[in-house]
Image: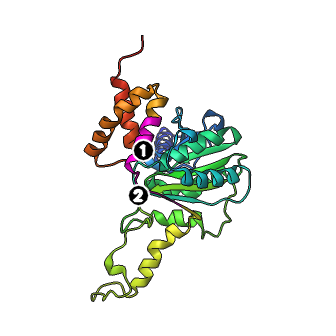
Amino acid sequence: MTPQLQHLLERAEQLITRIEAVLPRPLSAPDWSEAIAWRYRKRSGGHGALEPVRHVADMRLAQLRKIDAQKEKIQRNTEQFVEGRPANNVLLTGARGTGKSSLIKACLNEYAGRGLRLIEVDKADLTDLPDIVEIVSGRPEKFIVYCDDLSFEDGEGDYKALKSILDGSVAAATPNVLVYATSNRRHLLPEYMKDNLGYRPAEDGEIHPGEVVEEKISLSERFGLWVSFYPFSQDEYLAIVAQWLASMGATPEAIEAARPEALVWALERGSRSGRVAWQFARDYAGRQPAAA
């Protein structure tokens, strides 16, 4: 082999190595014993990976107050899923900070010992859902694919991958995977007045606006279970504040004394939610002198 040919082969091998480094690689299975929760993340070059969540929020079902009806539905569905019985994909919708995400985390902690696992997937990565489902389809564990704060704007096509996984793909549903999604609006795609059947389209407008409406509500309808959350009343908000303060070691007298400040805290934020109650409790408890 001539030196020129040897040099050419070395250059070609270097070029092939560089190309392989940037080409998308198939999603590989992680070490499932590392964690009970995982995040799907895209890295440079479009490579996707399941990264373990080392410290899962220590949220418990007993800590979630004033959402008993919602808790019963989610817990029942999750129990069915873990036991291998039929269960539904779930859409949790409603007021912000009312416990939608916390309820999912609490269910994970409740049933992790019975094989429940969670994979968090960002909206931007939903096109990779089929690959994620394929990776876990043969596992003995039960997996919740968790999509937080899910909604789509006009022109975004990622929701079509989610629709396919929920119901509509040629492939059969995988019995060990469910989708739990949270959103502040029930219809995950925006709706406009012009979408109504009585709308008179412009010359370049939609010919069949009724079909636009069907397209926009069809994604939500593919979730078998809808669970709605509502703003808390003042009494409910104060009860949640009291529960969090008690869990942080506050005495009944201190909890009673904190009520006026808790109301001002909520007023300043324009919301009486579970999240606001938790934030107030942390602030109030942190300002108290440590016990001797």
Q: In percent of the image, x 47 and y 78: which residue is there?
A: 214
Q: In percent of the image, x 70 and y 41: which residue is there?
A: 114
- Residue at image mark 1: 274
Specify whether 107 is left or right of 268. right
Q: Residues within 10 Å of mark 1 (few under 14, many from 20)?
A: many
Amino acid type, label 2: Asn
Q: How far apart are labels 1 and 2 at the CA level?
A: 15 Å
Give the x, y percent position of residue 276: 36, 42
* Boundaries of the magenta span: 227-243
What element does badge 1 sit on? helix
User: Given this view, does label 1 or label 2 mark the residue nearer the observer?
Assistant: 1
What element does badge 2 sit on? loop
Q: Residues within 10 Å of mark 2 (few under 14, many from 20)?
A: some
114 lies above or below 158: above
Q: Which mark is residue 147?
A: none
143 lies above or below 165: above
